[in-house]
Image (tube, rainbow, N blue to C red):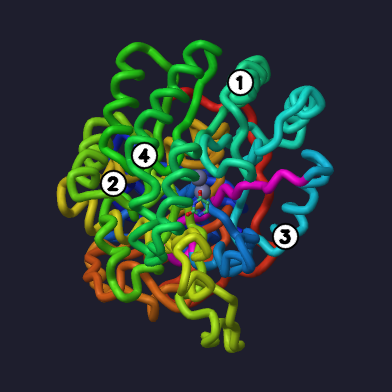
Amino acid sequence: MATLIKNGTLITASDTFQSDILIEGEIIVQIGKDLTHPSADVIDATGKLIMPGGIDPHVHLDLPMFDTVSSDDHYTGHKAAAFGGTTTAMDFVVLEHEGFKYSVDLWMEKAAKAAIDYSFHMNLTQFSDKIAKEIPSLMEMGIQTLKVFTAYNGRLRIDDGSIFKALRIAKENGMLMMAHCENGDVIETLVQQALADGHTDPEWHALTRPSWGAVEATLRMAAMAEQADSPVYIVHMNAGGEVDMLRYARERGVKVMGETCPQYLFFTEDALSREDGSKWICSPPMRTEMDNARLWQGLHDGTLQTIGTDHCPFFFDGTQPIVYEGKEIAIAGKELGKYNFTKIPNGLPGIQDRMPILWTYGVQTGHITPNQFVAYMSTNSAKIFGLYPRKGALVPGADADIVIWDPEKRVKYGVAQSHQRTDYNLYEGWELAGYPEKVFLRGKLIVDGEKWLGKSGDGQFLKRGTGEIL
Ligand code: DUC
Ligand code: ZN
Ligand code: ZN
């Protein structure tokens, strides 16, 4: 089976040019002008933009949290991703006491229903000599990344000494450490104090997680990475001061990279004071307009490398079912913390929203160029996470993960347009100019306008090798 996409404008991380693309089977085989093929399906892409499928480096599908689970699984989350132009998603494996292999097998079972390609990062939430010895086995499983937490004392956090040892092991094995940067000790103290003082509203989520913790933990991670001579990738950067720390460290040659997420670019902690404030509860929290602006600056000048979503949706009101693919479904959500902000499940929807929202409100507004858009949405993640040039590139030999983008399409966005399995959307009523029209996963058309042509099981697990340091 062959598909010939004619007369589109290709946008890559470095160039913009008119060209045709020929796909045979799952692969891009030719890029050039005036291509022909005797039997290909021909798509006229005049006036359309052609980009590599998006890669979301940070999602949490089917993740147990508090007394519930994130409301998108590896099928519904992937379907939503595809409608937003994303064809690869990277999820985080929960480390069980039985060890890495057991934990990965569990996540593989959950992900068997995948509808786009996917890979895993391993949460390194326990550390011992035994675990240290087993870390290299992750590379054999195709998992090149470990995530550590400097917050969530007694649950997910490991101490700095263990992080430092793990950084050295990562370095020896060509692996990459990812870090969730906040100050767990300060947070624990502030949360206890807030509850003792009777503060239970959502705004206290942000007030008990000050941005200074994120800033100093980012510098601390960069410093440990430098001392271990190992790279580190800071996830979900949310504070302007974190961008400063990243810039400071990178200017000194430290191999530190950074990811931000749309919610930290568009919203502030003020959202938590709304009547429906729990919709915006995520960790780390959103900050101030000044932080939004400094994160944009970090993207504009290339201090940051990627935009992920941290997609971890919950229902706003999980007592009221919604209809998804013709069936009613309700999953306990934010209402669990109605009387106590510490019981509100942490996380937001965003896997479908990321590319359309960033196109209109990032590219059209001049914060980033179209080429930076492709770099942040796809190519840089492919490079950092060891998938390039199979993914994230429009070149012969690459997987034919392709988005045909209609720059003229106008959409009033919101929960009605979204396939994310939850009852709200953060961008309700936002006007979009430009939207994905057709999405290919390894040569197969899976989204055609409003039509879903993908299916559960279409997605493949991607074994990853050592990536690049950007
Ligand atoms: N933050 C969230 O808000 N949800 C899931 C995990 C995380 O780090
Ligand atoms: Zn995190
Ligand atoms: Zn996360």
Q: Which badge, 3 or 2, is on the more N-terminal residue?
A: 2
Q: Secondary structure at mark 3?
A: helix
Q: Is residue 302 left or right of residue 141?
A: left
Residue at 44%, 23% in the rendered image? 220
Residue at 80%, 49% in the rendered image? 105
Disc ID at residue 161: 1
The image shows residue 363, relative to residue 342, as above or below, that is above
> What amino acid does circle 2 point to?
Gln
Q: Secondary structure at mark 2?
A: strand
Q: Position of residue 392 (x, y in %)?
A: 47, 41
* Residue at image mark 2: 18
Q: Secondary structure at mark 4?
A: helix
Badge 2 density bin: few <14, some 14–19, many ≥20, Cα 10 Å: some
* Residue at image mark 3: 110
Quadrant, the N terminus: bottom right
Mark whose residue sits in front, 3 or 2: 3
Question: Cα distance, mark 1 to mark 4?
Answer: 34 Å
Question: Cα distance, mark 2 to mark 4?
Answer: 19 Å
Q: Position of residue 457 (x, y in %)?
A: 70, 63
* Residue at image mark 4: 375
Question: Cα distance, mark 1 to mark 3?
Answer: 33 Å
**Residue range corresponding to the magenta coloring:** 81-96
